[in-house]
Image (tube, rainbow, N blue to C red):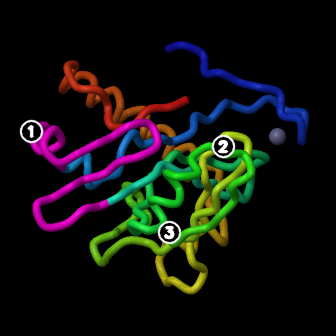
């Protein structure tokens, strides 16, 4: 076992483990395509994803999401994707990384976090762009009844946050063993 990275917390003065941000490299819709379909229909880079099906085009951007942790000094950070409509996507692309452009859009959460059931659909969010080359962040709509929304507004426990970090680390290892050729569909940084 290697020792886990720790840091001295500036708010309580104690040493804490460093939690990686839980990041997804692409929206779940893209992950679910076969390699051939990703080639044929998909376009993906670090901030944009477009899937051009024969009958429909879906547009996604990469955003950040902060999950509050109620009994700890740090929150859990995510790197996720949301889908935007064509007008919002174009506006975001047109002003990408302009420092003075701040806007907000409607976006659907587009990563199926394993802790939640999304079988009835996704989560409506507001996407806020930020200055200084930072990725936009999202806030789920508070009137939407779903455990994901509940957790955003009420927080999760430190124990739950650590479980999520461990689960992601484990998934990464399993995936690496199963398929060394393909890149994992999410990564930390
Ligand atoms: Zn602390």
Q: Compared with residue 113, is residue 134 higher up or lower down, i.e. above or below? A: above
Question: Are circles 2 and 3 on residues that touch, CB within 8 Å?
Answer: no
In the image, the segment drawn in magenta is: 33-58
Q: Residue 39, how many percent across, how many down?
A: 16, 38
Per the image, the residue denoted by label 2 is 134
- SS at circle 1: helix
* Number of the front mark, 1 or 3: 1
Residue at (61%, 21%) from the top-left corner? 4
Q: Compared with residue 98, is residue 182 higher up or lower down, i.e. above or below? A: above
Alpha-carbon neighbours of circle 2 within 10 Å: few (<14), some, or many (≥20)? few
Alpha-carbon neighbours of circle 1 within 10 Å: few (<14), some, or many (≥20)? few
Q: Residue 54, how many percent across, how many down?
A: 10, 61
Q: CA distance from mark 1 to mark 2?
A: 32 Å
Alpha-carbon neighbours of circle 3 within 10 Å: few (<14), some, or many (≥20)? many
Instruction: Count the labels in the image.
Output: 3
Q: CA distance from mark 1 to mark 3?
A: 32 Å
Q: Quadrant of ligand 1?
A: top right
Q: Which mark is residue 36?
A: 1
Per the image, the residue denoted by label 3 is 148
Residue at (23%, 45%) from the top-left corner? 42
Q: Compared with residue 163, is residue 91 higher up or lower down, i.e. above or below? A: below
- SS at circle 3: helix
């Amino acid at each position: 076992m290697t020792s886990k990275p720790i840091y001295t917390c500036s708010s309580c003065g104690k040493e804490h483990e460093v939690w990686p941000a839980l990041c997804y490299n692409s929206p779940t819709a893209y992950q679910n395509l076969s390699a051939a379909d990703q080639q044929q229909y998909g376009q993906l880079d670090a901030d944009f994803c477009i899937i051009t099906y024969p009958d429909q085009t879906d547009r996604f951007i990469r955003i950040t999401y902060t999950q509050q942790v109620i009994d700890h000094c740090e929150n859990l950070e995510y790197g996720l994707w949301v889908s935007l409509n064509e007008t919002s996507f174009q506006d975001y692309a047109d002003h990408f990384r302009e420092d003075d452009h701040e806007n907000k859009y409607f976006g659907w959460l587009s990563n199926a976090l394993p802790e939640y059931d999304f079988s009835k659909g996704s989560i409506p969010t507001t996407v806020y762009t930020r200055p200084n080359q930072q990725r936009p962040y999202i806030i789920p709509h508070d009137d939407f009844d779903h455990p994901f929304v509940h957790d955003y507004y009420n927080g999760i426990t430190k124990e739950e946050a650590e479980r999520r970090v461990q689960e992601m680390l484990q998934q990464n290892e399993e995936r690496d063993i199963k398929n060394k050729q393909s890149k994992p569909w999410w990564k930390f940084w």
